[in-house]
Amino acid sequence: MLDREEIMAIFRRTGVLWEGHFVLTSGLHSGRYLQCARVQQFPEENALLCRDLAARFKDQGITAVVGPAIGAIIMSYEMARHLGARALFTERENGVMTLRRSFTLEPGERVLVVEDVITTGGSVKEVIEVVKQYNAVPVGAGVLVDRSGGRADVGVPVQSLITFDIETYKPEDCPLCRQGLPVVKPGSRQGTGK
C-alpha cells in the first residue's frame, strides 16, 4: 500500500493540487482544488494509484466498475483492469445521470462505483442510483481523493487513497469572494468545477 507521502509525491510530480479561488461541482467555493485528471495523463502513475485502491476491494466479487464521465472514465477502466471486471461510465442526459452507449448491468451484479475526487459525494450518489435502477448491488465507492475529511456519506462504504479536510464555503459566505479574488471554474462540467 502507498503511504500518504508517496501519494503526495505523485500528486506533486503530476500537478494535481492547485491553490487559488475555485468553484466546485457542488457550487461551493474553495481556496484549494484537486485536479486528478492531471495524474490520469500519466499511465504508470495512475496505474499505481488505481492498483492500490483496487486492492481494497479485491475480495468483494466485483464484476463491474462504474464512474461518472468525464473525470472517472480513465479511472474506471484502470480499476476494472486491476479487479478483472468490466469498465463502464455514466453520462448526463438532459441533466440526469444515466448509462448510455448500450451499457447495462445485470440484476444482482456486484458493482464498484469510482470517482476521482469527492467533496459532498453528489456525483457518486447519482451513479449509485443508476446502479440500483438496474437492480445491481453497489458494494462500495472507491475514490482517489476524499476532500470532505471523511464526512461525505454516499450510502455505501467509501475507500479513498487520501483524505483532505479542505475548507469550502457557500458563495455568499466565501472570504475569497470578499477579498475580490477572481474565481476559476476548472471542472469537467460546463460552468462548474469539482
Image (tube, rainbow, N blue to C red):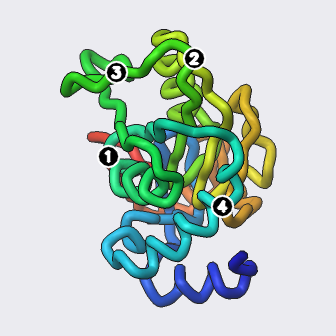
Disc with the residue nearer the chain's start (1 vs 2):
1
Q: Position of residue 23 (x, y in %)?
A: 47, 49
Left or right? Give the position of 34 relative to 3: left
Question: How far is mark 2 from mark 3, CA to CA?
Answer: 12 Å
Left or right? Give the position of 87 relative to 147: left
Question: How far is mark 3 from mark 4, CA to CA?
Answer: 25 Å
Q: Residue at x 50, y 21 (%)?
A: 131
Marker disc for residue 166? none
Q: Residue at x 52, y 76 (%)?
A: 48
Q: Residue at x 73, y 62 (%)?
A: 163
Q: Amino acid at mark 1?
A: Ile
Disc with the residue nearer the chain's start (1 vs 3):
1
Q: Is residue 61 above or below residue 57?
A: above
Question: How far is mark 1 from mark 3, CA to CA?
Answer: 18 Å
Q: Residues within 10 Å of mark 4 (few under 14, many from 20)?
A: few
Left or right? Give the position of 153 relative to 52: right
Which residue matches tag 4? Answer: 55
Which residue matches tag 3? Answer: 104
Mark 1 vs mark 2: in front: 2
Q: Residue at x 67, y 54 (%)?
A: 146
Regarding mark 2 in the picture, which secondary structure is present there? Answer: loop
Regarding mark 1 in the picture, which secondary structure is present there? Answer: loop
Marker disc for residue 108? 2
Disc with the residue nearer the chain's start (2 vs 4):
4
Nearer to the camera, 172 or 21: 21
Mark 2 vs mark 3: in front: 2
Q: Amino acid at mark 3?
A: Thr
Mark 4 vs mark 1: in front: 4
Which residue matches tag 1? Answer: 70
Question: How far is mark 2 from mark 4, CA to CA?
Answer: 22 Å
Question: How far is mark 1 from mark 2, CA to CA?
Answer: 26 Å
Q: Position of residue 190 (x, y in %)?
A: 27, 40
